[in-house]
Every structure is written in structure tokens, then in C-alpha cells.
Image: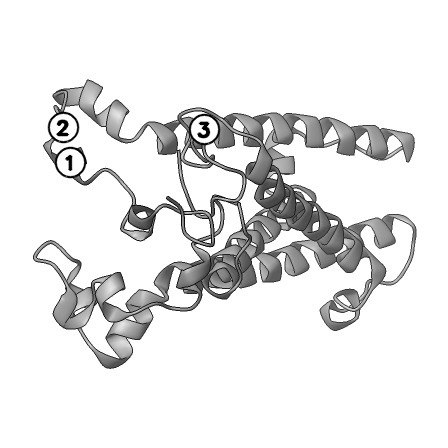
Amino acid sequence: MTTRDGRSPGEDSEQGDAGDDDAPHPAGVRGFLRDNGLVLAFGGLFLAALVAQAFAGCAALNNQLAADQLETVGLGDYLTSSDFAVDVMENWQSEYLQFFLFVFLTVWLVQRGSPESKSLRRIGSESDRRQRVGRHADGDSPRWARAAGLRLWLYGSSLGLVMGAIFLLSWFAQSVAGVAAHNEDRLRSLQAPQPWSEYIAGADFWSRTLQNWQSEFLAIASMVVLSIYLRQRGSPESKPVGSAHRSTGVEG
């Protein structure tokens, strides 16, 4: 039997494997690698991509400098240049904007049939009992989850707030590095440099910004919609293979 939103009566209870803490735990390095596999894998991919970007970006800059009959730069100089910094920061700010918006918007917005959405009956910040805060906190709940007032609000919003803060800092860093890189190009063309306030209202800054934003928004929308109808067995980002398309907020 299913409810009107396609979930079975027991599906609105907490998801997750409560027995993970009691599962057999390999000792030493093996246990560390298993318990931190996602962070280590993506951390390694991040570093590999960043190194590759440094070499490719340095080569691209040197091609441009050589075409302009200017002196080329070494990898060390490129890594401390505004050209490298702006390319990195414009990607970081868009990624953290994506996370910030997704964390906050999924509190209030739902998508029927998507595992990226919570149940249609749980729209909003939910009850203290459901969130296990205040007097409903468990013995192993974080200390601030047992608090009240401002401390509880801060902790209850901390993920989105940190994502938002990183977005703003990296976006500001992009603007600072961007105006420096932009002015270096202008000086090579014997043009006067632009002040920061002029640059952030100009085409170069917004072109760099919006070309990243549109791709992030498209990726999120695609994931939300495609996960309604497509499956990946064993992934928490997918519904179980046999779940109905209309089932919402169910993870595999």
C-alpha cells in the first residue's frame, strides 16, 4: 500500500542505516580508507584536476604572450598570477553557490518522484521531534542540537550558512583576481586600468560569472528530473531500482 505521494507508510520514517556504528570495522589504514573513501577519492580528483589545470593554463597563457611577442612565464610565476587565481575562483564560487541554493531551497521546494527531494508531506523546516533537537535530542546528538535560541538556529542552519559564506568569499576573490588579470591585459594593449568598482559592473566579470552559474543550475535541474525515471543501483543519489517513478525522497 502506498500513500498519495507514492511512499509506503513506513517510508516517511528516518532513512539510513542505524547499525553502521555497530558494523565490523577494519583496523588501521584499511579502516581509515574505507570510512573516508568519498572524501579521499574526490580530494584526489580535485588535486589532479587542479594540477592539470595549472599546466594547461600556463601553456595557454604562454601561447598568448608569445603571439603578442611578450616574455613567457614559468609555472611557478603562473601559479601566483591573477590569471590562475581568477580561473580557479570563478569555478569555486559557482560550485558553492549551487550547494548553498540547493541546501536552502530543498527545505521548502519539492519535486514529486525525485530522490533529491524530501517527501511532499515534509515541506518546511520540520518539527523539533523530527529533527531531534532541544528536548527531543538523543544522547549522541551534537551539543548545540540540545541548545535553544540563537545557538540552535545557527547550528540548524550551519551547512547552508557556511556554503553561502564560502560562495561570497570566493566570488569576491574572483572579482579581485579578475580585475588584476583584466588590467594586465589592458596594459599590454596600452589601455588605462579599470578600478574594481567599474570592473564588477562590466562584461568580463559577468561573463565569467554567468557562464558558470548557468551550467550549475542546469546540472542540478537535470539531476532532479533524471533521477525520477533513471536508476543507479546501490547509489544514495538514486531511488532503489524497483521504486515507482512517483516515489519521492526515497534513496537506494
Q: Are marks 1 and 3 in contact (CB under 8 Å)?
A: no
Numbered circles on residues, count: 3
Residue matched to label 3? 242
In the displayed structure, does residue 136 sit left or right of residue 83? Answer: left
Does residue 245 sit above or below 210 in this rendering? above
Residue sitting at the far left: 139
In the displayed structure, does residue 161 sit left or right of residue 96? Answer: left
Please state which of residues 70 and 221 is positioned toward the viewer in this rendering: 221
Neighbour class for label 1 at 10 Å: few (<14), some, many (≥20)?
few
**Which residue is at a point 57% across and 48% down the rendered structure image?**
95
Neighbour class for label 3 at 10 Å: few (<14), some, many (≥20)?
few
Estimate the x, y position of residue 132 in percent, counting from the top left.
Answer: 21, 62
Neighbour class for label 2 at 10 Å: few (<14), some, many (≥20)?
few
Please say whether residue 88 is visible from this viewpoint.
no
In the picture, the disc for residue 19 is 1
Residue sitting at the far front: 1
Please state which of residues 5 and 129 is positioned toward the viewer in this rendering: 5
Estimate the x, y position of residue 94 in percent, counting from the top left.
Answer: 61, 51
Residue matched to label 2? 23
**Which residue is at a point 15% across and 36% down the rendered structure image?**
19
Q: Are marks 2 and 1 in contact (CB under 8 Å)?
A: yes
In the picture, the disc for residue 232 is none
Closer to viewer: mark 2 or mark 3: 3
In the displayed structure, does residue 160 sit left or right of residue 70? Answer: left
Estimate the x, y position of residue 135 in percent, counting from the top left.
Answer: 13, 71
Task: Determine the secondary structure under disc 1.
Answer: helix
Q: Amino acid at mark 2?
A: Ala
Please say whether residue 246 is visible from this viewpoint.
yes
The mark that comes first in sequence, 1 or 3, is 1
